[in-house]
Image (cartoon, helix red, strand yellow):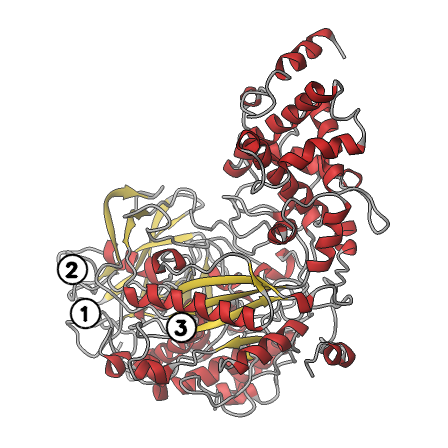
Amino acid sequence: MDRRTTLKWLIAARVAWPLRGYAGVASVPAPAAGYGSDPDLLASYARGQLWPLTMTARQRELAAVLSDVIIPADERSPSASAVGVVSFIDEWVSAPYPEQRQDRALILDGLAAIDARSLRVLGRSFDLISATERQGLCDPICDPALAVPADAEGARFFARYRELTAGAFYSTPEGRRDLNYIGNVPRTSFPPPPPELLRRLGLE
Amino acid sequence: MPFVTPDTMQGPYDVIVVGSGAGGGQSAYTLSMEGARVLMLEAGRRYVPETETPMFQTPEQAPLLGEGTPDKPFGFYDATVDGGWQVPGEPYVSDAPAPQGFAWWRARMLGGRTNHWGRISLRNGPYDFKPYTRDGLGFDWPIGYEDVAPYYDKVEMLIGVYGSNEGLENTPDSPAGILLPPPSRLVSDYMIQRHANALGIPTIPAHRAVVTAKLDADTIPARLHPGNPAAQRILAAAMRERGACLWATACGRGCSVRANYQSVTVHLPPALATGRLDIGTDAMVHEVTLGADGKARGVSFVDKRTGRQHTVRARAVILAASACESARILLNSKSAQFPDGLANSSGLVGRYLMDTVGSSVEGQIPALEALPPLNEDGADGHALYMPWWLYGDQKAGRLPFARGYHVELGSGRRLPGFGTAASMQWLTPGGYGVKLKQDLRRYYGSLVSFDGRGEMIPNERSYCEIDPKAKDRWGIPVLRFHWDWSDHERLQAVHMQRSFAQIIEAMGGRLRAPIETDGAKAISQGGSIIHEVGGAIMGADATRSVTNAWGQTWDVPNLFVADGAVFASNADKNPTLTIMALAWRTADHLLERMRRKEL
């Protein structure tokens, strides 16, 4: 870590929430255009193909850690970062559309702020602390309805970040398998539910 | 033949059809199959569902996981091309910002909005054509159910509609053998049906334009085109080319095997095969030209590829550009004889704009949690619906609103996407980590939603007119909308909220949010259900309507309207099937008058 970065973090660490003004979000200009009203629907799009990804390596590092706090690996499926969720978040916050431009400030400031809070409270950055310590940082902001007023913006960030992370995870083949989704295949008939299931539910 | 440019158009045609959606497609089909030479003009580009439809593409292949953007408001894989709530270079003006003002969804593509619609195909019933007689509100149509029924039969046979005959009040049966088999119910459908029926809410197979079994190409063509062996042959071949439903993928993407109805996969192929239909795309029609004899001579349009202006002639003109766009063309067709717009001697062009009332409630049903893996794609869901069930109470004055609604159901284990986890977040407040994953597995597939779709009564405050200033990129004046619901609609939306909560609670479920009892908040934005009709309503009196019972304008005998603009009321039934039935009837009438040399 170079001296300049350390200095920036130290300054940042003096305030944890609210988020505003952390990541220099405004310095990255919006890409000129989206995919237009008549894009090719059959192509498979790589993240960064339509507009450049703009997150820094450090932002992506923090994003990976937080995404995996929200969707960790377990016995049934891999973690969020293992299925490309970070690149999705980068695509999202780098996109030219109004909703995404709004999220950009929230997400990038939030990532910087959670790291700053980690440094301030624990003396180490968010990616270097233990799982239990991360939980200690996330619990106060994980539920907007329960967060104290000083954490309101942090909770707003966490809720949106969870939407993006979980939204992306369950949009992948691994996420679909995790939910036991077995459709999206052509069939010659569409049979009714198994009778024993209907019986069990009292729906015969 | 058959896709033409301004240079290769072979005017004068028998008929020019403006628009290529449900009304335009049906008009062009009927006219060309029965011998007329037709030019169809479409403002959007040519569109080929067989090669352009993203049938099995999954969210991770799309930008932003397929989430909606201003470029593709219904999501990346929605079939709409060059359309949405805003079309670049083609503004409109609303008298109030959302959620009050009117929202106008357009598609600029061959087949128009039939490419992405919900395929829900309900017949208007006898009450729906005579609402004024029944309760003194709005207007009667100059026709009754018995006039339209034969055309509903024909359209259902042509496009393929699944459903069942239940003999319910104002919910017409189709003659035996016309409807295709409805799809199997989902587990959640069984449960909804049981509890709703116990509450007295009938829950019956939906009617949708999805081919669940191969169409009967051996007998239908002769029933639709008696005495016309050439048309029968063409239609039989076209029917055999259509595949049956693959029981997968959302109909809103379009269908490459042509299993659901899109004008461009059902109406246009046989019409083109007659050799009598020319189609000009990227042709922005803005005026019906008038001859010295007071008859329409043809239309003027801008070729969007060159920006150049062209005119083309025909013996008759059919407007089917969508209710509001047809009204716009009429209002922009000004002449010494018609200074306020063509066919507007009544002053009613653009008036009595109607949409459908929408309101929805979502819930979660514990009994549906953690079911074994099931493929519940079906026919894009939509196995069942609830027709309006309180006609008696309404007639007896026991309800504070005059017209009914039907209910569309959402449930099952649908293709997960970006919104899937967010839709369950209310069930896992504060959740993250392994516990969140476990919770989502349990809740996935246990959500239900109920969408009310209700009748709006036409009012004086909901209309469109030409904005005095704003123009589109070709300099064509654009529409300005005015919108207001009445208490009949607002109170109906509240009734929807209460009914749906009752069903969810009867199922042992919990509501996602408290129901909304303020009608102004419970009701959808005007235009947002995309069922806008009216603007050139039909009637029995030339001073109180724009067209007669045939969609023929009172003022210009060879000018017809064959889209939702002619609706004199907007029953809760989704308008598309009725648009097609009326367009077929109008085309039959036009052909008959041409044979008699009256046009």
Q: Are marks 3 and 1 on the same chain?
A: yes
User: Where is the C terminus of chain B found, in terms of image quarters?
Assistant: bottom left
For the point 65% across and 80% down, the residue is: B214
- Pointer 2: residues within 10 angstroms few (<14), some, or many (20+)? some
For the point 33% across and 80% down, the residue is: B394
For the point 43% across and 47% down, the residue is: B87
Mark drawn on residue B101 = none
The picture quadrant where one finds residue B209 is: bottom right
Q: Which residue is mark 2?
A: B338
Residue B221 x %, y %? 54, 85
Q: Nearer the viewer, residue B71 or B546?
A: B71
Mark drawn on residue B572 = 3
For the point 68% across and 46% down, the residue is: B431
Local SS, label 1:
loop
Whether tag 3 and tag 1 are in contact, CB under 8 A, the answer is no
Residue B199 x %, y %? 50, 80
Whether tag 2 and tag 1 are in contact, CB under 8 A, the answer is yes
Q: Nearer the viewer, residue B266 or B377?
A: B377
Q: Which residue is mark 1?
A: B555
State which tag comes first along the sequence, 2 or 1.
Answer: 2
Residue type at numbered disc 3: Asp
State which tag comes first along the sequence, 3 or 1.
Answer: 1
Q: Nearer the viewer, mark 3 or mark 1?
A: 3
The picture quadrant where one finds residue B368 is: bottom right
Residue B35 to residue A70: above or below: below
Q: Residue furthest right?
A: A75
